[in-house]
Image: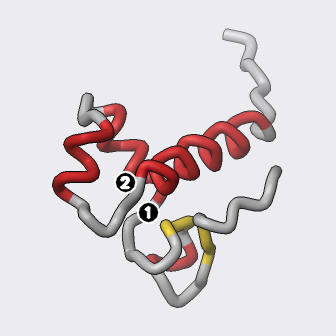
Amino acid sequence: MAEEPRIVLDPKVLDGKPVIRGTRLSVEFVIGLLAGEWNEDEILANYPGLSREDILACLAYARDVLSSEKVFPSAA
């Protein structure tokens, strides 16, 4: 997984979930907003401390985590 300087993991912040540096906003939260049909402009308007680069870093982090995930289908 590529190192992303905008995303940090600190056990003292949100129990170590990946967050955007300098915030308590988790990658999961931002991805959830996007999945909930918020667009970039809506996110930036509601969270003025964020930048477009922060949103892209969240997407890149999620992509990297998913690309390293191993899935083993069960025989049903």
Q: Mark 2 near mark 1, Cβ–Cβ under 8 Å?
A: yes
Residue at image point 80% right, 40% down = 68
Q: Quadrant of the C terminus?
A: top right
Across the whole image, how many numbered discs are drawn on residues?
2
Q: Is residue 71 above or below residue 57?
A: above
Q: Nearer the viewer, residue 14 or 44?
A: 44
Q: Secondary structure at mark 2?
A: helix
Q: Is residue 60 above or below residue 14?
A: above
Instruction: Work out how far the residue at label 2 is from the one at label 1, CA to CA, in angstroms.
Output: 5 Å
The amino acid type of the residue labelled 1 equals Ser
> Label 2 belongs to which residue?
29
Residue at image point 65% right, 37% down = 63
Residue 45: x percent and y percent?
18, 52
The 10 Å Cα crowd at callout 2, few under 14, some 14 to 19, many 20 or more, is few
Q: Is residue 63 above or below residue 1?
A: above
The amino acid type of the residue labelled 2 equals Phe
Residue 75: x percent and y percent?
74, 12
The 10 Å Cα crowd at callout 1, few under 14, some 14 to 19, many 20 or more, is many
> Label 1 belongs to which residue?
26
**Numbered badge on residue 72:** none
- Toward the top, the furthest residue is 76
